[in-house]
Image (spheres, helix red, strand yellow):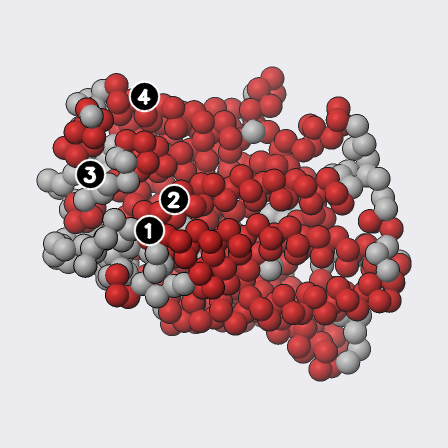
Amino acid sequence: MQTAAQVDMTADVSGNRLFNKDLAPVKIKERNWNTYNFAALWIGMAHCIPTYMLAAGLIALGMNWKQAIFTITLGNLIVLIPILLNAHPGTKYGIPFPVLARASFGTWGANIPALLRAGVATGWFGINTFIGGAALNNFMITLVPGWKSLGGSFSIAGLSLPALITFMVFWAVQIWIIYKGMNAIRIFENWAAPLVLVMATALLIYVISKAGLGPIMSDPGKLQNFKDFFPVFVPSLTGMVAFWATLSLNIPDFTRFGKGQKEQMIGQTVGLLPTMTIFSSMGVIITSATVVLYGKAMWDPSEILLKFSNPFVLLFSLFGILVASVSVNIAANIVSPANDFSNLAPKHISFKTGGLITGIIGILIMPWKLMTNAGDYIFNWLGVYSGFLGPIAAILIADYFVLRKKELIVEDLYKDEGGEYGYTRGFNIAAIIALVAGIFVALIGKIVPSLGWLFSYAWFVGFAVAFVVYIALMKGMPQTFNAGRTLKRTMAN
């Protein structure tokens, strides 16, 4: 029985070239993700080394620990809003992100936001794979000292032979899990989340018992007045929003498996907000203690764990770090681009093939070159891509909630012609104009110094501009942009 909360597709469009079994709506009887599954998903993704090290970048920019944690928490509270909004159609209709994007961008135009999202994901996939591979390499050096000299001075693109081997081993493990399918991912996230939390808590208790809270906790920071703090706070807040802005787009890839709206909303809220705040705080406390224990601030947990000499502790620690890195990488950075690449040619590219494409690109971008210092990471990498993702989120939300009032014709999302979302040869020009306008305003400050303040607010200004432009174009000239029958009727009312 269909309800207002969830809808099954009734028409058979399996022969359409926009359809494959990986992009098909999930039937209600097959939606088995509950509140714990969604909470575990976010706990598993947030309990990763980049989250642990997130406060490090802010403290390196001059913030004290309170300012850093406040910035991180506020950023995640803000990004939770578009996450929950875009999650709704996934749960109601059982559709993934690239299929949802067809409603606003057109059946073929949806490839534009899908590829933009996929591009960011491949970057993140590469970064997390490099972090996980580096942790594995460090542990190998500790357990087998001769490992470090393997291959001598031989290197490829800046990676030594040992580093290259561990990078590729870590890469292969993730691709293997993706080939097992979404249910395997759900099961993996369920047990990975508590394991990583237990490990981090054990490390926290150990360092506090040995060194107390340490000097970083008492450091007042370099930004003690508002005039100094605000110019750093704004782009940093944008970076924190950008940290999960990717998931604010493709969250339907997961909520399509949800039992209901209540389960996904509560699970995501409980899983994201406390986890990011607590885990970042743990990173600050543990790092502060390392100053007392080892004479320097050690923000990389794998570096701290290498101080332990017990081989069993080392192996268990290695396992925990690898699980944490795999957990976030698979959920956040492979599932979405796998679907996005599949959306390019559904009859030829499956979810598994899309995941393999993601993995290959993640190698080619040489991610070790993206993480050179905190400024480049927060202000450039996070800031630039937030200028692309904010406008996309705005268009999806404006179309679904404001214009369509949460009503979609699911079968038409899989028709390449003659359907509600065909627009002009499969492209909605209004959405493309709004996207370009949002990206332009968000990133113009990157090349025009006098408008640099706009880049500091990249996600926010991009979202606002695209939201307003899209609604104005669609409401003002629905005939010009070939808005579908249902949309015209909804706007008329």
Observer-nearest residue: 176 or 23?
A: 23
Return the residue at label 4: 472
Secondary structure beneath disc 1? helix
Q: Is residue 14 above or below residue 428?
A: below
Return the residue at label 2: 86
Going from N to C along the chain, the mark reached first, 3 or 1, is: 1
The kind of residue tagged 1 is Gly
Which x, y percent locates residue 458? 53, 31
What label sits on residue 148 in the rendered view?
Answer: none
The kind of residue tagged 4 is Ala
Mark 3 or mark 4, which is nearer to you? 4
Secondary structure beneath disc 3? loop
At 62% from the left and 33% from the top, the residue drawn is: 235
At 38% from the left and 72% from the top, the residue drawn is: 180
Going from N to C along the chain, the mark reached first, 4 or 2, is: 2
Return the residue at label 3: 421
Crowd band around label 4 with a 10 angstrom C-alpha radius: few (<14), some (14–19), many (20+): some
- Confirm or deny contact between disc 1 and disc 2 (CB under 8 A): yes
What label sits on residue 90 in the rendered view?
Answer: 1
Going from N to C along the chain, the mark reached first, 3 or 4, is: 3
The kind of residue tagged 2 is Asn
